[in-house]
Image (spheres, coloured by chain):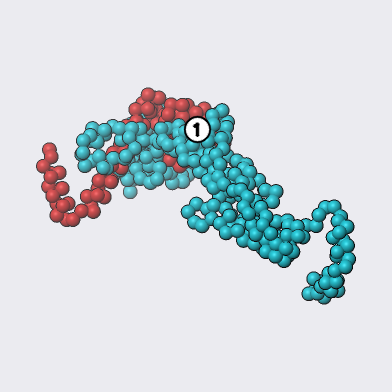
Amino acid sequence: MIDEAEMCRRAGIKSYMLREWIQADWIHPRSDLMGASFSDIDLARARLIRDLAGPMGVNEEGVAVILSLLDQIHGLRRALRRMNSAVVAQDAAVRRRIRYEASKIP
Amino acid sequence: MASTDPYELLGVARGASQKDIQQAYRRLAKKLHPDLNPGDKEAQRKFQDVSAAYDILGDEERRARFDRGEIDASGEEQPQRRYYRDYADTGPTSDTYSGTSGFADFRDNDDILSAFFSRRAGRGFRMRGNDRHYRLELDFLDAVNGATRRIILPDGSSLDVVIPPGTRDHQTLRLREKGEPSSSGGGAGDALIEVIVRPHPFFHRDGNDIRLDLPITLTQAVLGGRIAVPTPDGSVTVTIPKWSNTGKVLRLKGRGVPSGGSRRGDEYLTLQIKLPQKRDPDLENFIEHWPAGRTYNPRREMGVA
């Protein structure tokens, strides 16, 4: 786990920014008696927000919309990945029928 | 090989204004940022090229040095960055943020697709609350026989802890979901309670057995007799055989520590002959005229008289 100071250093952000992002519900640290702590996914997400809000010039509302859509995309991608592995596990005949049915949908 | 000229990479003229350069970068970054293109492997390389170009041209001073040929376009090699998309699609933390509430329409009815969406409904982030750690001091017999104790939590609320019979010193009891609530709609953490067992004045625990030094009188040692003996769950009557010496061990089967399921332990009594506190002239007189008391040498094995 990464503490707040380390998180800010590695993400290249100021601590007030991190606190604002947590406040905005964009980053979800674990908190305990020792204070907030962060994982690798939190760090990667903070860097994404930094890119968006910094050099890419996206304003606060824009960041919120982007994060929400990205979160949905990743949920969808996970579902697709699960479905793909379930389809791959089928017999060739079943996979053929699935492909055929899929091709009928406009 | 792709161009490494930062002006070409950003698609701007050499005389472009800082504002033009910034706009060009933003246009490209929004198209190429790897996290906005989760499945596109190429996006990462392209984005890095564009970012490196903007590192130089986005800063007026660095741009001037580049234009004067003082620095080249390669810049410093950046350590490989792990993008958000690398965590968000797969792996143990992948559903930390992402949710499937946007696809609730797929999950209606018995649709087979529902099987492929995460079972965690609504917004994805549902981390369990933290565990809380407590210490609880217990009397010896409460640990052996089981008990219920109420602990008062820092926030003033209380928690009833059931101590199962046979609880050991330093054993940790886990109360599911009695720890910190989750800040994100997940389950609460557990309460972990370390039990400290106070020593008992005369019982000692040895695994699931109880050991006890049992004082007896000289009369009981010589003539035997029935005496009351303490056990963890009350006193029992025990027959002391005739001529029982100090150090003799008697076993009380099944009078030790209850252990869930398996056999209850035993209690072992080690006899200790105790003379009366007060001197007794009759006994002294008898012993004075008791020859065997002078011929028996209990220290013979130690090689002394």
Taking the spot 67% from the left edge, 61% from the top edge, the residue there is B240
Residue B33, image x, y percentages: 35, 37
Q: Amino acid at mark 1?
A: Ile
Instruction: Indicate the secondary structure of the residue bearing disc 1.
Output: loop
Residue B122 in sight from this viewpoint: yes
In the foreground, B59 or B152: B152
Query: In this structure image, what is the colour of chain A?
Result: red
Left or right: A3 with respect to B66?
right
Position of residue B179 relative to residue B140, above or below, is: above
Residue labelled with disc 1: A13
Position of residue B248 relative to residue A65, above or below, is: below
Residue A27 in sight from this viewpoint: no
Position of residue B281 relative to residue A57, above or below, is: below
Left or right: B60 with respect to A91?
right
Q: What chain is tagged by disc 1?
A: A
Residue B172, image x, y percentages: 55, 46
Position of residue B174 relative to residue A12, above or below, is: below
Residue B115, image x, y percentages: 26, 42
Residue at the farthest left position: A104
Taking the spot 49% from the left edge, 56% from the top edge, the residue there is B262
In the foreground, B149 or B295: B295
